[in-house]
Amino acid sequence: MRKYLILTAGLCLIMLVILCVRIKDILGDTHKETPVAQDSGITFYNVWIDSFEDDKLFVFCEGIMAQFDINDNYSEDMVIVGTVADITILSDEVKNIVYKSERINDKILSVDEKGLETSLRGRIDFADNYRIYGIYDGVKQLFREDISVGYSVSDIVLDNNEVCAVLITGVASPDKIRVAIMTTGYEEYYHNEVVLSSDAGMVMNINGTQYPYDAGMEVRFDKNNGFLQQGRVIMSPPDGGRITIHNVLRNGEVRMYRGNIELSLTDNGIVIINELLIDEYLYAVVPSEMPVSYNIEALKAQAVCARSYAYMQASRAKLGNIGAHVDDSTSYQVYNNTPETTESIRAVNETSGCVLTYEGNVVSAYYFSTSCGHTANGSDVWLGMKDVGYLSAAMQNDAPINEIYDLSDDTIFRQFIDNPTVSTYDTTFAWYRWHVTLTAAQIRESYEKKIKDRYEANPSLFLVKNESGSFVAAEPYDIGNIKKIRIAKRTDGGIITAIVIKGSKKTVKILSEYNIRILLAPYSSDITRNDNSIVKGLSLLPSAFFYINKESGKYTFHGGGYGHGVGMSQNGAGKMAESGYTFSDILLHYYKGCVISRM
């Protein structure tokens, strides 16, 4: 029996006409035109011809498998299934089929709202009515983000030299990852100039023509470079060689990169992509994310988390518009901020191929610096995420306890922060507890500094109180002087997911722990940590595990932990390894229900 919803001809025609009206609303700019009924029938563009059985044509479009009678002029040997076509329907019957026969398989290097770039064909624009189908494990409607960049698991269907359909033929099994190298300071993706050299020499490939460069020779590219104007430039060192990017500094130093360096010219500047094997990428992720002085078992746990995360990111096109899977900043995983070491290479090699899986699927193994003694639910930190068992809030006690802590209760949470009676894996670390004091003026300054960016990123996470006292969707700008801050929601893990800021002009409710942390950022204030050490200013609060005291017009935030609080605490993992736990013990402690699998 078919897995799909199958509509018979009469009902199908009604449903498809309704879909004609709704396609733009559902898919935005993915389909720029909709079929229009004419005296000669209704034409639907770039549908998937699934099968032809018992004089019935089965057509998939917009998530529906439709069943039609077919005109007597079409015999069975004239119907081509497993392809894309335009079909015209009149009186519940398919009157005409126009097949799209040009189909290529090529490595897709980038994809955006206007088109895509392939390894052999270069840039190809999308047709007005293009569609994206998954044709493995049945057929389904997919979207641009589902296209795998850097892998040849998609067939491209062309019509008049435009992409009328992308057929995703399988799931990529990533062995490589494409990393966007940001500018110094991680400010943006676009470089005005790029300067490269290699310790072992390198070869430049542009449109199939190769140009060799000697070891140590610097090659300079700017936006007027003739090679870049011809297309994507690929710089490749010999096996074992590495390329230095001289125009990018990390911790005040230039870095060397394994794998290839790809350069592409955009209207905004030059994009640098480092394509390399995932394990080679991890060599420089592990030391950038965890001190290599930690026990090897902690480093191995970090390597498995980072590999799982990288594997998931390399399977999708989240940064497909610039041809990358991830960038090298904290938005994904920090890469090559600290160079690879013998310890990080060992940790990666000794766990090679190991990933975390849950119910048979590789997971995004989130991690963070330090817990407050309790972790958070993933769905509380990233609103809209489904609850998953392996990202559940849990106490991080290092010995059995009898007490049950409901940290959603503000009184219990305050006691937990001020007088911790439970010893946890993170207890001895500096960020375990912290406090910082801000004036109302400083809070207003922090709020106004970032509110436009945060609101434009997701307006649904901001509500403004109206005259009747209800919170409604509205612009949260110009709230005036800060009068009061109230915690509106604290979850069972203790994390704050909603606050209300009362200003002299507006009262605003802010949702999501990240928005809260960044809009209350202590840019110019001293943060006092658990060991009485001082950190001078941060661009966001250390965590959303905090409570607030107001006194003499000032607000003191008392909190614990550093980071979002979901998944593995890196410092907690370090302490577990120091106590004799193996990397598998550590991972199965933090990711309940997961299995360590080999890919």
Image: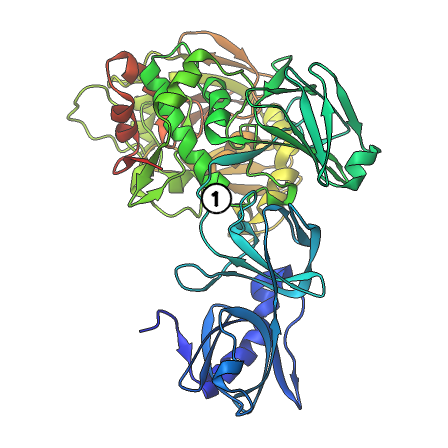
- In this rendering, the answer to whether 78 lies above or below 22 is below
- The residue singled out by tag 1 in the image is 315
- Choose between 222 and 423: the one closer to the eye: 222
Left or right: residue 380 versus residue 210 is left
In which quadrant of the rendered image does the C terminus lie? top left
Left or right: residue 328 versus residue 76 is right
Residue 42: quadrant of the picture? bottom right
Residue drawn at x 43%, y 38% is 381
Task: Give the amino acid at mark 1.
Answer: Ser
Residue 308: quadrant of the picture? top left
Q: Residues within 10 Å of mark 1 (few under 14, many from 20)?
A: many
Residue 547: quadrant of the picture? top left
Q: Position of residue 503 (x, y in %)?
A: 59, 37
Residue drawn at x 54%, y 87% is 74
In which quadrant of the rendered image does the N terminus lie? bottom left
Residue drawn at x 48%, y 31% is 278
